[in-house]
Amino acid sequence: MISKYSRIILLSITIMVGLSQTLPAASSTPAVAVVLGGGAARGFSHIGLIQAFEENGIPIHMLVGTSMGSIVASLYAAGYSVDNLKTIVTNLDSAKLVDILFPPRGGLINTERLKRYLDVLLMHKTFDQLEIPFYSVITELATGREVAMHHGNVAAAVQASMSIPALFPPVEIDGVHFVDGGMKNAVPANVAKNHGADVIIGVDVKKELKEIDFDNILNDIQLAMWFMIGGYVEINTKDADVIIVPDVKYDSYMDYQKAEFFIEQGYLAGLRHMDQIKAAVLAADPDFEFLPYSQPGLADSELATVIQQAERVALETKRPFGLMPEFAFSDDSALKIGARAQYGGLGWFRIGYRYGLSKEFGGHELFLGLHKPYWPKAELFVRFLENKANVGVKASVPIGEQAYLSAAYQINGPYLWQLRLSNDSILMGKHFRLWSTAAVTKTEADPDAVLLGEFGANLKFYFNEEYDSLFEVTLARPYLYGGLCMAAPLGQFEADPSYQVGIGAELKLFGLYPLDIHIGVDFQRGSDPSWRIGFAKED
């Protein structure tokens, strides 16, 4: 017979065995949290930092992110490898992911396409489906309350975390409107502490100015915002064991084209702090062994498929209602200005009005165009010039990555039909880009009328290899351009040359939205010089 004391001992052993299967041992690995701060493009540094952690065996048990830090953290928490992250950010085409809102509603740029793009990359996961626990820090707009989002759709929380007020609209989650977490907590180390982290490593990609001009209003506003945000950072990083600041102090927040540079700086910063990081881990567990590892992620072919699908879903997102300014160019590159309406499916159709400044191709013009992603672009127009209606249609289809073929037909216009082949980049270097066009034009409806052949070559010379920041609002890359066009009736060898020279700038509005503006002069034998003003944008 088992005594009462024996039964108590057996019961105690049973309970202890059960607990040992459900609770971590007292000497388990310390929970290491990596806190990735906000910083727009500068936040690409986080990818290099994670690479340094993997190579040196620093475990990541928790991720906390704000703004760009939230984007990087969410993708890594979802299972992407460091190489996957590098591929995603270096191939990011922001023109496909953002819309200018006009009139503005909550912000200047609509990020719904970006949200759907991220949602596909994140495989529509909720927080509880992530490989690594992740907290996305956001700010409630009505109250300024800080929220560490850890439930629901990950992409929605990430979109909120990077929604800079006035630039991006606030994001509604469960009936509450949120904006960028960096407004209250740019480096949320306190969130990691509150959720049980034993070792906290924070990353601050703060910016500095090379020169301070106190007579510059934008400069003063920028400094004021920085010291207000910096005050929160100082408070919220007191619990961090290590704070890493990558050497990107003078680089623009908006310079998304420098992803490789930022990644490299994050990697180097991680290596510089590695002894300090390991010391913090060993202080929590003196027996910890640092074993290099790498998160497997997706194969290159799988990743390419996911990115392509994400871009397609983003581009097919119906756009909100808006009355958008319209800038276009006629066949002789004369500027036309006007407006077009868009709403839902009308985001793919262009319905509107333009007025052209050219004598041959100008006048009042109504148009209906189709610009649906992955379809040929087409446009039907009616132009009124000197009491005559000119009706026409034109279409273009891409050929490979850089070239496209276009065709036009019109009645009562300066020509009957035209075929044109354009290549936007025959040669490209750090300081130049060469592109060309070739066209065949039927000048009149008469069967015996002339077929005109044309070939043109244009060269841009860039003053700088990279874009320069203009007050953290726009990136600009100025250039000189020159062009030569040879035109002659087919079968004849005497060509009539014309020349173009001018100056311009390629712009990235807020670092995301591409524009091209130029002004120059056209010269042609037997004619007076004429001004050329150009304005181009990505569709």
Image (tube, rainbow, N blue to C red):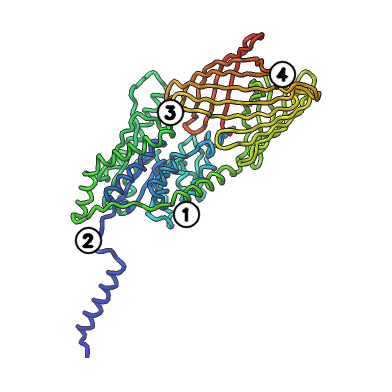
Residue 119 visible in the displayed image? no
Give the alpha-carbon distance from disc 3 to disc 2, as whole Å.
49 Å
* 113, above or below 418, in the image: below
Residue 228 visible in the displayed image? yes
Mark 4 near mark 3, Cβ–Cβ under 8 Å? Answer: no
Q: Secondary structure at mark 3?
A: loop
Residue 360: mark: 4
Q: Which residue lies at the image location 26% right of the left edge and 43% below the top edge?
A: 242
Q: Secondary structure at mark 4?
A: loop
Q: Residues within 10 Å of mark 1 (few under 14, many from 20)?
A: some
Q: Residues within 10 Å of mark 2 (few under 14, many from 20)?
A: few
- Rendered location of residue 404, percent (x, y): 61, 33
* 38, above or below 389, in the image: below
Give the alpha-carbon distance from disc 1 to disc 3, as whole Å.
33 Å
Q: Nearer the viewer, mark 2 or mark 4?
A: 4
Residue 472: mark: 3
Disc 1 target residue? 125
Q: Secondary structure at mark 2?
A: loop
Tell me which numbered mark, 4 or 3, is placed earlier along the sequence.
4
Disc 2 target residue? 27
Mark 3 near mark 2, Cβ–Cβ under 8 Å? Answer: no
Mark 2 belongs to which amino acid?
Ser
Q: Is residue 80 left or right of residue 59?
A: right
Give the alpha-carbon distance from disc 1 to disc 2, as whole Å.
33 Å
Q: Nearer the viewer, residue 168 or 346?
A: 346
